[in-house]
Amino acid sequence: MKHILTTTLLSLLLFTSAVRAEEGKLEVNGLNFKFASPWAEIQSTGMFRAGTLAAKVEGAEKPVEAVFYSFPGAGGGGDVEANVKRWLGQFQGTPESKREELDAAGTKITLVTATGTYNDGPPMGAKTPRENYTLIAAIVPSGESNIFVKLTGPKDAIAKLAEEFKKIVLSPFAK
């Protein structure tokens, strides 16, 4: 009897976790970002992190994270050009890059994709060069400030998540 109860409880927990991982939402600055499997919300750590989604994907040793940043005050976190320049500067040399302006029901979202040797590490700490890495980052307007969403990882792994990442950053404006 104890074994059946334990098995049933475990099954229920796994089912609940699977349902939550299949569909969810992350609220940042009053915007609801919708996500589905393989994405799952994880605990955010670090200053200015407003949320973090993680996805396990083939080609990456560990789950990759899409980090949502929010900075206080009008214009917090800097303008679009400063952030694009900073993101591209996180690569050694000049990365292969592309910039897109996405129309989300009249709201302009800037999307930057860059691939090359990424200098991974904290803003003010030691960096580890990661060859053949891709960064996809979005700037999402939200009231007086912006939400910055950044995803980095091995090129092949990030390529598998690129379309889902776009759907996530567009989702608060979908009707």
Image (cartoon, helix red, strand yellow):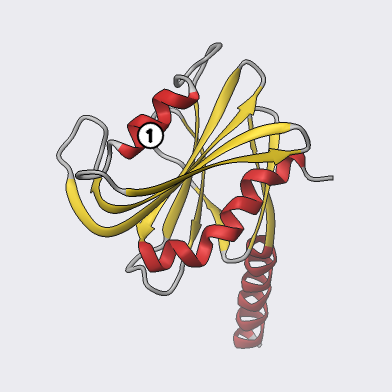
Residue at 57% of width from left, 66% of height from top?
A: 38
Q: Is residue 99 left or right of residue 15?
A: left
In percent of width and height, residue 122 lies at: 26, 37
Residue 31's place in the image compared with 100, above or below, is above
In percent of width and height, residue 55 lies at: 49, 62
The crowding category of the residue bearing disc 1, from other C-alpha atoms within 10 Å (few below 14, some 14 to 19, many at least 20), is few
Quadrant of the frame with the N terminus: bottom right
Quadrant of the frame with the C terminus: top right
Element marked by disc 1: loop
Q: Residue 132's quadrant in the figure?
A: bottom left
In percent of width and height, residue 13 lies at: 63, 69
Residue at 41% of width from left, 62% of height from top?
A: 63
- Count of number-bearing discs: 1
Residue at 60% of width from left, 87% of height from top?
A: 3
Residue 118's place in the image compared with 23, above or below, is above
For this orientation, the residue located farthest to the right is 175
Amino acid tagged 1: Gly
Q: Is residue 54 left or right of residue 93?
A: right
In percent of width and height, residue 93 lies at: 20, 44
Q: Is residue 5 left or right of residue 115?
A: right
For this orientation, the residue located farthest to the left is 126
- The residue to which callout 1 is attached is 46
Q: In this orientation, which residue lies closer to the viewer: 18 or 111?
A: 111
Residue at 65% of width from left, 78% of height from top?
A: 11
